[in-house]
Image (spheres, rainbow, N blue to C red):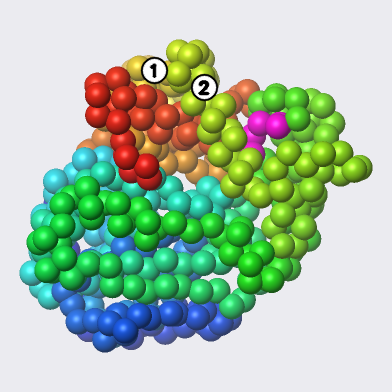
Amino acid sequence: MVREPIRTRWYLRPLTYILSAPEVSAHKAQIHYDEVTKDLKPPFLLLSNHNAFLDFKVLTKAIYPRRANYVVAIDGFIGREWLLRNVGCICKRKFTNDTTLVRHLFKVVENGDVAVIYPEARYSLCGTTAVLPESLGKLCKLLKVPVATFICHGHHVNSPFWNLHPRGIKPTEADFKLLFTKEDLASLSVDEINARLVEAFQYDDFAWLKERGLEMKYDKRAEGLDRVLYQCPHCGTEYEMSSKGNQLICKHCGKTWTMAPDGSLSADGGAPTEFSHVPDWYEWERAQVRAEVEAGTYDSGELPVEVRSLPNSKRFIALGKGTMRHNADGFSVKVRSLLGREYEMNIPVASMYSCHIEYNYLGKWGDCVDLNTLTDTWYTYPKTPRCSVTKMALATEELYFAYRRSIGKPCKPGLA
């Protein structure tokens, strides 16, 4: 984690472009530059939204042949650390306050290269903006280099986090804009910088799909969406949503919805459609979680879990079975190994503004929450159908927002 970033090896720069080109070409990606970014010279900070692995490939084309260093989560390094380090990747554990990373970014700009960050720190769950860290504006001022944004459109609806099967969306788009010059950063306050960053990061892939008149070419386009839309808006029941083909199904009340090729939802059988827009359903779920937090009733209960540890980039270690609880005190995980050794991880609400989750991680272990310290990452897999990692992600944010309000420092919209 403390190793200094390596400048992209000269012989690997064309390789990154060559490996990115086929998929970029297949999606006929359109990159919209402003009057500056086409020829913007490093060093500069480049902030991108995050919806799919295609983000990396389109960005590679946009900045080539400039050298760049990319902040990448530690699980991306498993089995390929040498390659990732030599193409310029910097290892990071998600949602941790890591001063080492700041030092690495200073080194990148001192080298005269592009520092690439995905500040949402996870794939978007439904193709809309995730919360940005409040520290982002301060980082921009500290680095004292121009700041550009790279906002991609169409990548989520082409290969959503909840079902990665490609949907043949083309053309996709990306907007490459200069947001701040060095002079701007010197004259603006951190709050002003953050406000403009939040505004620049507003996007909605489902709305974009419909506005462009494009369609998903996949006849199982709703499968997996129940992982995100875990609560029925008709009967209010949680954890009994399922999906098959193009349908979402509530197993409790029997109501069904069909997803059209343009991504919109409609209730079947002429029933009223509560939410035709996927992000609206998701934000309704957030409101339900917020109400629980404000009432002091949010509590996952004690859940049976299996835990895999990732202390380094070599491999996952099966830590053992145990329990996890998420409530107003934060996350508490207790594990006993096969040899009888006990482990514990506690993440208080005040220390983590959001969390990373996975759906059916690596196609074999199921849904999980990954919890991080500066020295370890625990991939924590609930072994009960009576929970949702999506709800835990929403609750992590809402608990943090409530904590900030309780100490008289409420978060500004779009920030944490």
Q: Residue at x 11, y 60 (%)?
A: 187
Q: Residue at x 42, y 84 (%)?
A: 18
Would residue 77 be found to the left or right of residue 113 on screen? right
Q: Amino acid at mark 1?
A: Ala
Residue 94 counted in the magenta span: no
* Secondary structure of the residue carrying numbered label 2: helix
- Label 1, on which residue? 328
Which residue is at the far right?
Answer: 269
378, 416: nearer the viewer: 416
* Secondary structure of the residue carrying numbered label 1: loop
177, 305: nearer the viewer: 177
Q: Is residue 149 visible?
A: yes
Would residue 265 be found to the left or right of residue 397 on screen? right
Q: Quadrant of residue 226?
A: top right
Q: Is residue 316 above or below residue 158?
A: above
- First-in-chain label (1 vs 2): 2
Q: Residue at x 83, y 34 (%)?
A: 255
Disc 1 crowd, CA 10 A, few/some/many (<14, 14-19, 20+): some
Region in magenta: 227-233
Q: Kindly identify which numbered label has been placed on residue 291.
A: 2
Image location (x, y in percent) of residue 143:
12, 61
Would residue 70 be found to the left or right of residue 386 on screen? left
Q: Is residue 98 above or below residue 76?
A: above
